[in-house]
Image (cartoon, helix red, strand yellow):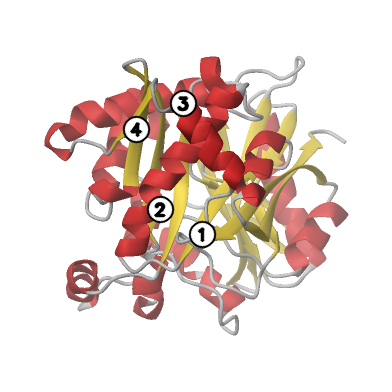
Amino acid sequence: MNSSSQSGQVESVSGRAAWQAFFDFPRQVYASDPSWVEPLKFERKRQWSPGNPWFEHAEAQAFVLRRRGQVVGTISAQIDHLQPEEGGSRVGYFGQLESLNDAESFRLLLDAAGDWLRARGCTEMRGPYDLSINQSCGLLVEGRDTPPMVLMGHAPAWYAEHLEAAGMRPVMDMLAYLLPPDFEPPPAMQRLLARASKRMTLRPMDFSRYGEEIDLLRLLFNDAWSENWGFVPLTENEFRATGRELRQIIRPGYTCIAEVDGEAAGFIVALPNINELIKDLDGRLLPLGWAKLLWRLKRRRATTARVPLMGVKRQFQRGPLGAAISFGMIDQVRHALDADGIRTVELSWILETNQGMNNLIKTMGGKLYKRYRMFQRRLGD
């Protein structure tokens, strides 16, 4: 699919040279941004590989916008066939949107993604997703003065303005908080934990049974998040692939599984902020990047971490026991993080509508420091 105007030509990405241009372009946007951390290119390429298990239930197309032969923007369009209809509307996604500061470029890129989605039966377009809600998602709209944590995005100030000018409307904000692991537990937290202590036990993941534990986390995740806005379940193959990818950086003490009356009831996973260790690699692991990264993973500790995965089973979510499970898991993991030299932890993404979790984090002293926004528009408007 190609479309053109006097402002440039949008082309479907096909062939090695076009893919290389697609992966290389973001550096033009962020060249002068000291907060940007370039993602590892091999990760981006693996994401688009036919071997990515996400493609077992999804399809996607990448596009580049060229002007006078030069790439000046990129975008992806994708459909996840596990995404349920919403009020009779079929939702498609856009993502990996990068462009220089030009409103017309945004319009052309979004129109190209929308046309591709409409041709496949979608009536709404939502994003940005990279490539799904279970990966990186949302546009950074507040907190650009600090680098993104592991698996989080970054964006220039003009992106939101140009998205709205192209007809995209905000539909959901997701929040990121900072919390020192050595915080003083509030009295309310201590009382809840004391009351739940007879029924609740807390343990780290058992890495000698790593595969079985990953399967358990998937069941807990899909149950805990099933009523969340935009939820799409993770398949067995997807979650196992994620587990394999994280095996090199995940640490037993950074994990916790909560059990209530002997039944798994919740989990939390924290990751060292690998972005601290890759910022100077410029997205490349060759020729020496691999050696540097492996050495840093073994010998150099990050001082920041992120909690990307946390959930409490639905049957426990509403009420004091659910709060105690969340408090308990955070309390268990924070001691390991503190002992490992972690000084700051990010908790994200928290839906703005999730008042229970937002209040819980604030009770512990968490400070809101970044805001990510999802946009949507009806196709055909």
Vertically, is 270 above or below 298? above
Q: Amino acid at mark 3?
A: Ala
Mark found first going from the N terminus, 3 or 4: 3
Q: CA distance from mark 1 to mark 2?
A: 9 Å
Is the Cβ of the residue at disc 1 closer than 8 Å to that at disc 2?
A: yes
Other residues around mark 1 within 10 Å, as few (<14) / some (14–19) / many (≥20): some
Residue located beneath label 4 in the image = 257
Residue pictured at 58% horizontal, 28% vertical? 231
Mark found first going from the N terminus, 1 or 4: 1
Mark found first going from the N terminus, 4 or 2: 4
Residue located beneath label 1 in the image = 183
For this view, does 46 lie left or right of residue 380?
A: left
Q: Secondary structure at mark 3?
A: helix
On the image, which quarter does residue 5 sit in?
A: bottom right
Q: CA distance from mark 3 to mark 2?
A: 19 Å
Residue located beneath label 2 in the image = 334
Q: Nearer the viewer, mark 3 or mark 4?
A: 3
Residue located beneath label 3 in the image = 196
Q: CA distance from mark 3 to mark 4?
A: 15 Å
Q: In x, y percent, where is residue 314? A: 54, 18
Mark found first going from the N terminus, 3 or 2: 3
On the image, which quarter does residue 163 sit in?
A: bottom right
Vertically, is 343 above or below 74? below
